[in-house]
Image: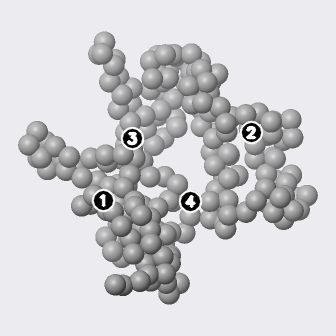
Amino acid sequence: MESYDVVIIGAGHNGLVCASYLLKAGYTVLLLEARSVPGGAATTEEALPEQASGFKFNLCAIDHEFIHLGPVVEELELRRYGLEYLFCDPVVFCPHPDGKYFLGHQSVEKTCAEIARYSSRDAQKYAEFNDYWQRVTKAIAPLFNAPPQSIIEILSNYRLENLQSALSVVGGVNKALDWVRNMITSPEDILNEWFDSEFLKA
């Protein structure tokens, strides 16, 4: 019976990445997956071969953005093995039963123009919303690419200038509590705070 240093259950994209790094480090790895297709939420498959032959769908994740914030693609040379991201525009099409529709674009300006068809206030708020969450992403992205640490370790390694820099990203000390609240608030509540149009929130 073969033995392994590590057994990983689930060959989703996280399991695949974990297994790859462990193999690079010299460990033996057994990666187990119940499905016949690896990749988990990152798979693109021909899901409706009879109704839509040749059309492929992302069955779980509608996007795969966070991978671009880290070094995984480069360090594992994934493009060399055929990885290709297709950045579509528009990125979102949301039809409504009454015939209305919404298109979300790569460009914030184009998306705001689309939103303005339904609510000029929501169009303005979307620009602010996007800017806010871009800053939040910039603030937390380094944590994705660092070894896990306890809160005590994180705070003990923060110099004053680093803390001030992080706070400036979220809007200063007075906004820090708002930032924490936003991180633990439900998506529904956040959308209700920012936007008016039920059609757009949906």
Q: Amino acid at mark 3?
A: Val
Measure how far apart labels 3 and 1 are at the Cα level: 31 Å
Give the secondary structure at mark 2: helix
Question: How far apart are the alpha carbons under marks 1 and 4?
Answer: 29 Å
What residue do we see at 86% from left, 35% from top? 174
Dot 3 or dot 1: first in sequence order is 1
Q: Residue furthest bottom?
A: 26
Residue 12 disc label: none
Q: Where does the image place residue 143, in percent across and percent down from the top left?
A: 67, 59
147 lies left or right of 101? right
Residue denoted by label 3? 91
Residue with the mark numbered 1: 34
* Label 4 Cα neighbours within 10 Å, binned few <14 / some 14-19 / many ≥20: some
The colour scheme of the drawn protein is one colour
Three-letter amino acid code at disc 1?
Ala
Q: Which residue is mark 2?
A: 180
- Furthest-right residue in this view: 160
